Image: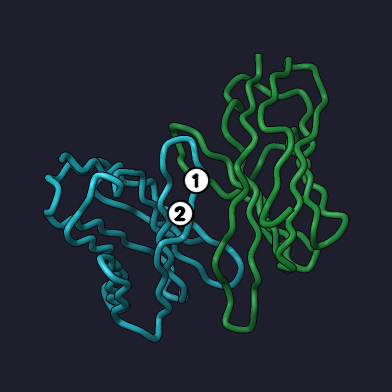
Chain colours: A green, B cyan
Amino acid sequence: ETGVTQTPRHLVMGMTNKKSLKCEQHLGHNAMYWYKQSAKKPLELMFVYNFKEQTENNSVPSRFSPECPNSSHLFLHLHTLQPEDSALYLCASSQVGRVGANVLTFGAGSRLTVL
Amino acid sequence: GENVEQHPSTLSVQEGDSAVIKCTYSDSASNYFPWYKQELGKRPQLIIDIRSNVGEKKDQRIAVTLNKTAKHFSLHITETQPEDSAVYFCAAANTDKLIFGTGTRLQVFP
């Protein structure tokens, strides 16, 4: 398996459910990201993890809870979501160096529908 | 924080014509400016990027220009082909955080 892998590809959940999205990167990168893609805000940054430390939390509601156990794995735990949270959730990774940001490699996304 | 604006939101061109998409950014410390192409149902993929120490970069039919003073950068696609039809996103970054523009839907008509 190469690149960035996301599971599940599709998820339907009720507002009271608890579910998790998983992302795994096989590129040896040191930073991982969650982006939300919807019609309203096409690519909205949610969380950034650099060397497993969270460096950015873009005022995301607490019903989204990220977890980065190591530099290759990233999770997004979902709890009591709202219908407006329905979107495509994209994971990405990059190699951040001394010069700063670098190319993002995206996963295929997890399409979430909240009923 | 950084804010990136992108125009136009939609762009239709005839095959063979050129297409130009423009972005402005707010954070003067931003130093990395990539462009991504997202075809329908697929993930965004990098097509070209530029760093702040360079004013222009070209790769075959695509080129990017950067004006640091004015804080804007542009994507130029020449001799457009139907397979160029997609949504294009610009982004700006300082450190590890890439902030994207709102996207431009490009349609190339044969």
Q: Residue furthest bottom?
A: B53
SS at mark 1 in the image: loop
Residue ID for mark 2: B100
Give the image location of residue B73, x and y in percent.
Answer: 30, 67
User: Which label was assigned to residue A43?
Assistant: 1
Which residue shows up at 64% across the image and 27% down it?
A112
Give the image location of residue B103, x and y in percent.
Answer: 36, 46
Chain identity of mark 1: A
Question: Looking at this view, is A31 or B27 the one in front?
Answer: A31
Q: In the visual, does B48 lie left or right of A75? A: left
Q: Amino acid at mark 1?
A: Leu
Marks 2 and 1 share the same chain: no
Q: In the visual, does B53 lie left or right of A98? A: left
Label pair 2/1, CB-CB below 8 angstroms: yes
Question: Looking at this view, is B63 or A15 the one in front?
Answer: B63
Which residue shows up at 31% across the image and 71% down it?
B71
Location of the C terminus of chain B by quadrant is top left
Tell me if residue B94 comes above or below residue B10 in the rendering.
below
What's the distance in space between the residues labelled 2 and 1, CA to CA? 6 Å
Tell me if residue A67 comes above or below residue B29 in the rendering.
above
User: Which label was assigned to residue A93?
Assistant: none
Which residue shows up at 70% across the image and 56% down it?
A2
